[in-house]
Image (cartoon, helix red, strand yellow):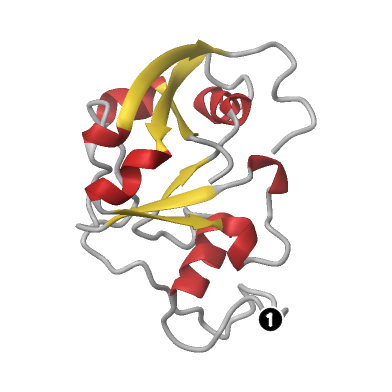
């Protein structure tokens, strides 16, 4: 484990609507995914036939809105989480959750380091780590060691998606 802490950025609206709880887009669903042969995914060897964690990691990191999973995106890079909390500069502020990786296993949270599952991550600069709570619900509050209020950084959204 190179980086002790992971970070998750959320905008003010998301923070308020979730009451400060980190939830996946799909709850009570296994961390697996099945792609359809409809052209929505490249045949580049990353996806495999049938339901799999491999497909869940691939789909989640490509677009978690199009391919929702029971995973929660995080990054070991605070500035990337801050970027997501403010969506570049679309929002004036947001919140960054600081998560202790050393506590994840004790509270039944699995981590999937995207670069170990996907040959060419869609956003390599994020160094994304997907967290999946064992109960397939919200992230246990015990692994959250801080919540930091952040402001948009001028120029932070330029040239980034």
Residue 160 position by quadrant: top right
Residue 31 position by quadrant: bottom left
Q: Is residue 137 above or below residue 15?
A: below
- Point 23% across, 33% down: residue: 141
Q: Is residue 141 above or below residue 2?
A: above
**Which is more toward the observer, 160 or 102?**
102
Secondary structure category for the residue under label 1: loop
Residue at the right extreme of this rendering: 159
Image x and y of residue 52, in percent: 44, 78
Q: Is residue 47 above or below residue 154?
A: below
Q: Provide the residue designation for mark 1.
A: 45
Residue at the bottom extreme of this rendering: 49
- Point 77% across, 25% down: residue: 158
Q: Is residue 107 above or below residue 7?
A: below
Q: Quadrant of the C terminus?
A: top right
Q: Residues within 10 Å of mark 1 (few under 14, many from 20)?
A: few
Count of residue discs? 1
- Point 46% across, 68% down: residue: 56
Image x and y of residue 150, in percent: 49, 13
């Amino acid at each position: 484990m190179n980086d002790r802490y992971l970070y998750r950025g959320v905008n003010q609206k998301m923070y308020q609507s979730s009451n400060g709880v980190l939830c996946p887009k799909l709850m009570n669903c296994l961390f697996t995914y099945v792609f359809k042969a409809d052209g929505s995914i490249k045949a580049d060897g990353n996806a495999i036939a049938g339901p799999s964690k491999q497909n869940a990691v691939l789909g989640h990191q490509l677009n978690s809105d199009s391919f929702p999973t029971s995973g929660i995106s995080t990054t070991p890079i605070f500035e990337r989480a801050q970027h997501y909390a403010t969506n570049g500069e679309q929002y004036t502020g947001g919140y960054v959750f600081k998560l202790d990786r050393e506590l994840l296993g004790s509270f039944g949270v699995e981590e999937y380091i995207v670069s170990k599952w996907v040959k060419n991550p869609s956003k390599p600069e994020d160094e994304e780590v997907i967290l999946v709570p064992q109960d397939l619900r919200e992230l246990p509050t015990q692994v959250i060691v801080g919540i930091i209020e952040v402001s948009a950084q001028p120029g932070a959204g330029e040239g980034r998606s």
